[in-house]
Image (spheres, rainbow, N blue to C red):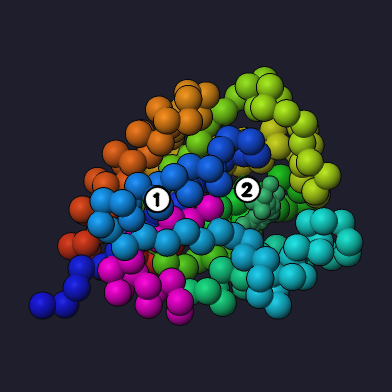
């Protein structure tokens, strides 16, 4: 019998919501329960394209806005063969940001509409579950200052949040909103429950295509 496929699980949310911490904890819990699971993150700054993106985010270089948007998308597409292989082998992928960040961040810039921003990512492997870590700006501020990278400021993040809310209206995507103001352990429990459910459902279903 062919092995059952892994699930594609994505965590999204604004800065300081705890995505990275929760991705790591989820992978650890899944592995400890005997399930194959690996973490990925976008942008993946290790590839050649990822290094261009990283320099841009660190403000070491400037890139034209459409260009960098397409690089973020290309950075996902270049990893698709690897993602598909792992999923087919039965490994669940826990992904820190995906195409939703791509569309939300670029469309928060003047002159960009959400629809244009979504197009380059149409047809990517469709997540079986997207959890949006919800944290209000006041609470996020309590978690410390923003860093020095591009996009790390309050006005821009407010617009990003609005774009995410637009994206969450799309019922073809399995969105789950997670209250990220709870304790790390409480959030983790929530995320684990949703993930185990998604893993069970996904194993009997073909991988879908995003926004198609
Ligand atoms: N970001 C991330 C984008 O603008 N587009 C994308 O497609 C993705 C995946 O890059 F500000 C932004 C979001 C964030 C930055 O930061 C990446 P982290 O801390 O490495 O997640
Ligand atoms: Mg960051």
Given this view, does label 1 or label 2 mark the residue nearer the observer? 1
Q: Is residue 46 above or below residue 159?
A: below
Q: Which secondary structure lies at badge 2? A: helix
Between 207 and 87, the one nearer to me in the picture: 87
Q: Is mark 2 within 8 Å of ligand 1?
A: yes
Q: Is 117 situated above or below 162?
A: below
Residue 138 appears in the figure: yes
Q: Quadrant of the C terminus?
A: bottom left
N-terminal label among 1 and 2: 1
Q: Which residue is disc 2 drawn over?
A: 104
Query: Left or right of 53: which side holds 164?
Result: left
- Residue 89 belongs to magenta span: yes
Q: Is residue 127 visible?
A: no
In the drawing, what numbered circle is on residue 28?
1
Q: Nearer the viewer, residue 211 or 91?
A: 91
The number of callouts visible is 2
- Which residues fall within the magenta stretch? 81-96
């Amino acid at each position: 019998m062919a092995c059952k496929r892994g699930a594609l699980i994505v965590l999204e949310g604004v800065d300081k919501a705890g995505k990275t911490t929760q991705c790591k904890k989820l992978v650890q819990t899944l592995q400890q329960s005997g399930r194959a699971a690996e973490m990925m993150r976008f942008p993946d700054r290790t590839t050649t394209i990822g290094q261009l993106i990283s320099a841009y985010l660190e403000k070491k270089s400037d890139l034209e806005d459409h260009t960098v948007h397409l690089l973020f998308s290309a950075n996902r597409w270049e990893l698709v063969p690897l993602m598909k292989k792992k999923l087919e082998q039965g490994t669940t992928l826990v992904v820190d940001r995906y195409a939703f960040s791509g569309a939300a961040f670029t469309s928060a810039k003047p002159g960009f509409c959400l629809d244009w921003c979504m197009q380059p990512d149409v047809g990517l492997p469709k997540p079986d579950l997207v959890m949006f870590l919800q944290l209000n700006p006041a609470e996020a501020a309590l978690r410390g200052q923003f860093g020095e990278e591009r996009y790390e400021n309050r006005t821009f993040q407010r617009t990003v949040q609005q774009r995410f809310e637009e994206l969450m209206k799309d019922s073809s995507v399995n969105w789950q909103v997670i209250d990220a103001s709870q304790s790390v352990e409480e959030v983790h429990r929530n995320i684990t429950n949703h993930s185990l459910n998604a893993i069970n459902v996904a194993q009997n279903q073909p991988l879908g295509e995003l926004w198609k």
